[in-house]
Amino acid sequence: MDHNATTPVDTEVVNAMMPFLREIYGNPSSLHYFGQQSKKFLESARINTAKLFNLQTPKNIIFTSCGTESNNMAIKGAAFANKDTKNHIITTKTEHHAILEPCAYLTKYFGFKITYLPVDGYGLVNPDDVKKAITPKTVLISIMHANNETGVIQPLQEISGIAKEYGVLFHTDAVQTAGKIPIDINKLGVDLLSISGHKIYAPKGIGALYLRTDSKSIVSAKQSKIEDIIYTTKKTKMHQLIHGGSHESGRRAGTENVPYIVGLGKACEIAAKNMAKENERLLKLRNKLEQGIKATIPKANINGHPDKRLSNTSNISFEGIESEGLLFLLDKEGFAVSAGSACTSGKQESSHVLAAMGIPPITAQGTIRVSLGHQNTEQDIDDLLHILPKTVAKLRSISPLWNK
Ligand code: PLP
C-alpha cells in the first residue's frame, strides 16, 4: 500500500526487457546490424512513451535515469541557459525535494531568486498567485502535477495559459500522474514534463523528460520565443546537464539504457490500455478505506482535496499519535504504508507539504499515506480496516498527546 513510493516491475515489462539483457545488446549508436537492431527498439519505446501523452512527436521525449534527473535537467537546464538575462523561478511550497533542492542550489551558487507559492488548505495553488509572481526576470515556472504525499492535482491547464501569455517556460513534475490519469501534453500546455519508470511498474533507474520543440502548438508571437528557448540544446537555450556524446539528439549524453527504456515503453503501453479501468477500481477501494476510517476512528482527517486528487492516494491524520509508531505496528502486521514522503524516509522529518496546507505540526505528526496500486484488493482494504481502529486506539491509550 505504498505505490507512490515505488511499484513492482510488471511481468509483461520484465518479459519485454529480457531479450535486451541477453541477445539484443548492441550499442544503439553503432552503425552495424546489432547497433541498429537496438536503435529500432529504442525508438519504438520512445513512440510508446510519447503515445501515453498523446504526442505525435516522439523525438520530444528524452530518456533519463529517473524522475529526479528529469527535474534537475528541466530546472537547471533552463536556468543555466538563460542566466545572463533571467534569474527568477516560480515554484510551490509543496514540491518534491527533486524540485526544491535544485532550486535551492541555483540560489546558493548562482544567485537565482525563487518564489515558493503558497497552497490553500486543500493543497491547491491559486493560478492568480502564479500570474502575480511573474516578473521580466522569470525564466521558468515549475509546478507539480499531483503531489506525492496527498495526491492533490494542480490546475495546470489554467497555469499554462498564464505561462504562455507571459512567454515563460512551464515545467511540471508528473512523476505521480503519468500512467495514473490521462495526460494530453498539448492540452495541458506544458513545455517540459518529468516522469519516472518505477512509479508505473517499470524498473528503478529509468525516467524521461518531455521537451517541447514543435512549432505547431506555438501560436502567438510571444510564444515563438519559447520555441527559441527550448528548441535545441545546440542553440544553448536549454542546457544539457550530462556532457559527453550526442545521444538523445545531443540533449543527454551517455549510451542509452536500452533494456530499461524498452521496459518504460512497455509500462507506458500497458498504462495507456488499463488506466481508466484501474482508476475506477482504485477509487472504489480508496473510498471504502476513507469511509471505513471515518466511521470507526474518531478524530481522523483525510487531507487534500476531496475530488481533485489521485484515485489511489489517501493522506490521513490521526490526532494524538505519532505516525512512526503506527507505521511500525502496521508493518508488523504486514501492511506497508508510509509517513509523509517516502523518498526521504529513514530521515523522519515533518512534512513540508502538510505544513504548507496549514495542518498544525501536532496533527501532521500522526499522518500516514496509503497509496494503492495493481496488487491491492478489496480484501486488503477490509484487512486494514480491521486492524487500524484497534492499532490507533492502542497508540492513543499510551500517548501523552491524546490523554491531554
Ligand atoms: N517527483 C515526485 C513527485 C516523486 O514522487 C518522486 C519520487 O517519489 C520523484 C520526483 C523522484 O523520482 P525518482 O525516484 O525516479 O528519482
Image (tube, grey):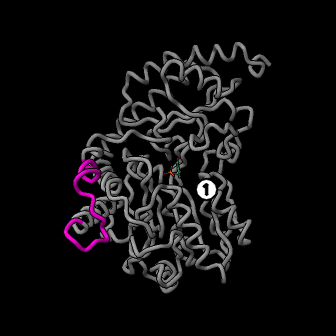
Q: Position of residue 220 (x, y in %)?
A: 47, 83
Image point (56%, 36%), residue name: 315
- Judging by the rendered image, the residue that carries numbered circle 1 is 125
Location of residue 127 with respect to 60 vertically, above or below: above
Residue at left 65%, top 57%? Answer: 101
Nearest the camera: 177 or 36? 36
- Give the crowd class for mark 1: few <14, some 14-19, many >=20 residues within 10 Å: many
- Left or right: where does residue 10 sit relative to residue 308? left
Q: Amino acid at mark 1?
A: Val
Position in image of residue 380 (x %, y %): 41, 23
Considering every residue shown, the one lying at the far bottom of the view is: 221
The front one of 111 and 278 is: 111
Residue 353 magenta-drawn?
no
Closer to the camera, 397 or 201? 201
Above or below, 46 relative to 110: above
Q: Residue at x 38, y 77 (%)?
A: 214
- For the view shown, which residue lies furthest in the right direction? 404
Say which quadrant the C terminus sits in: top right
Residue 320: which quarter of the image? top right
Residue bounds of the magenta highlight: 16-34
The answer to which image quadrant residue 141 occupies is bottom right
Q: Position of residue 88 (x, y in %)?
A: 67, 72
